[in-house]
Image: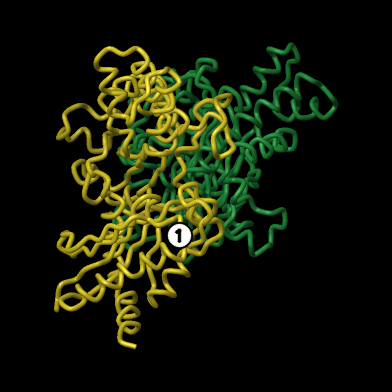
Chain colours: A yellow, B green
Amino acid sequence: MDRTFSIGVDLGGTNLRVAAYSLEGEFLQTITLPTRLADGRDCVVSDLCESVSRLRVIHGRTGRLVGIGVGSPGPLELPSGILRNPPNLFGWDGFNLREAIESSLDTEILLENDANLAALAEQVCGAGRTTGASSLCMLTLGTGVGSGLILDGEIWHGISGMGGEAGHIVVDPEGPLCGCGGRGCLEQYASASAMIRMMSEASTPVANAREVADLAKAGDKAAQAVLECVGRALAIALTGAINTLNLPLYVIGGGGSGAWDAFAPNMFQELLSRSYIYRLTAASADRNSAFNANKTRICRAQLGSEAGLLGACLLGLRGTTAETVSAFERKVAS
Amino acid sequence: MDRTFSIGVDLGGTNLRVAAYSLEGEFLQTITLPTRLADGRDCVVSDLCESVSRLRVIHGRTGRLVGIGVGSPGPLELPSGILRNPPNLFGWDGFNLREAIESSLDTEILLENDANLAALAEQVCGAGRTTGASSLCMLTLGTGVGSGLILDGEIWHGISGMGGEAGHIVVDPEGPLCGCGGRGCLEQYASASAMIRMMSEASTPVANAREVADLAKAGDKAAQAVLECVGRALAIALTGAINTLNLPLYVIGGGGSGAWDAFAPNMFQELLSRSYIYRLTAASADRNSAFNANKTRICRAQLGSEAGLLGACLLGLRGTTAETVSAFERKVAS
């Protein structure tokens, strides 16, 4: 009866994943379902809560549940838990996700922007662990570009949870209109979707970022130009972050990072010319150099598409404070 | 003998200011000297330490010194205290300012980037106090554009003190070359110097930002165009900060903020079109609205040119931990 575990939920636009995770760092069980957006949000919340309840019952027999972490696409207002025009959950604007889940489960949850949870997972179990960095910014190159910020080991979600939108850093003030209403946002140049779009505009349709990289490697000029643009846009956005935040680590993940080998050289070259703080602080190639301890490092994410789910589980484990546990146990007992 | 006080130092490129400051929030005495850069850094450090010692002796008779805060122009590597190519302290590259001051005073000091100290002062005694914000980003429009970041009441100086360079956020990737080696940095458009430079390029020389604002108000087209450019550049840089950090407060100070009334309208208009997080979170004009508690606010700095000195004094007061005080008293006693 002594195993401590959490439950983590990754609510994605395509898949809904729910897992039980032990304090020892082991996935005990994972449930994956399609996110039934077409059937309405009540249906999705019901699927979510049923899966959580199942894991709670099964693993509660031999363990002690200390917290439920839930990751949702943003913008997500916190602590309220209200979604604000989330592009990947169409029709959910104004929906109070926290209230819906908590009233169904009859317990408190720890709710967070999914990009922040992926960043937390990278900090605890991925690139942060490898480099010893307790602070990092993670950019996720997917349909859009999401971002998560970990400062001194804690998620930074700003005053109301509405940060995490580094995809809408302005890279070119006169650039193309973005879905957000702005112009020339990072996401118009560096998301996986942008890479696919730019290739299609160059009359070479591809399915994913990896294909763009393969084409570039094979000498395709269009693919090389697209990846140069990706590296440049990332460098411009990172220049702002590096010059203002001076974090030790920036991590690039998501489907678009499949083209890392092809866009990274230009990104690093542009960074060296654009950011003087990067020039002053770039880590040397020798990872173990003591001189690197306070340096700036930019690397590819180490965890794959499970980062968000893992982050939700890790957040759940952080529910392990005396108050949370006892409040939780009172609720379960009553 | 019971009055608790700190000593704060503001080491500027032009003036050196040293003050004793009481826990009750009162300047007890301020010494202002020219910064004798032409006579070499040893001379400047000696002037600085002599002034600190004077205040330590005078106010130590009736009070208890708990900490010495020193603000320096950056880039300043922390915790080492080594200056890295500081543009306003020419010839000081590689100089260990902490070591020089500490060995002369024979005590520990609290050393910090001056822009961070101005931000701390605004948070504790200025715009942060008025709005109740415990986090803020401050942009100082002076010779360059400096920045300071306060997160949950604490200075964020990054992994090695090398942040605070929001002046080098890229506003236009193809813009003019900047002294930092980059292109199109915020500081090329929004510093007080940039305003003066742009007016001079338009054949209307001015002495300061306030004059640009006066000319614009009187209908001068060149001045209006310059201030439109300032507002636009600030909006582009702030869009990145707002979308990624979601802070409750952004404060604009320094000499350039003398033109606030003239550039702010365009800045707010550009922000509304460029940052969807700003659109979602902009505070209403009613300052006291409860609905504003978690909103985004952008305002002019409330403290004048003494913000850096005040911040150094406030930092000194934070030396009031049991360890610091006792370590300090041991040193004084020995």
B119 over A21 or under it: above or below: above
**Residue A318, x across and y down, in percent:** 29, 64
Q: Secondary structure at mark 1?
A: helix
**Residue A274, x across and y down, in percent:** 42, 22
Tell me the chain of label 1: A
| Identity of the residue drawn at 26% across and 39% down | A301
A100 over B204 or under it: above or below: below
**Residue A175, x across and y down, in percent:** 55, 25
Quadrant location of the C terminus of chain B? bottom left
In terms of image quadrants, where is residue A193? Answer: top left
- Return the residue at label 1: A39
Q: Nearer the viewer, residue A25 or B207?
A: A25
The answer to whether residue A35 is visible is yes
Q: Nearer the viewer, residue B84 or A117?
A: A117
Q: Nearer the viewer, residue A311 or A217?
A: A217
Q: Nearer the viewer, residue A262 or B326?
A: A262
The answer to whether residue B103 is visible is no
| Identity of the residue drawn at 51% across and 40% down | B241
Q: Amino acid at mark 1?
A: Asp
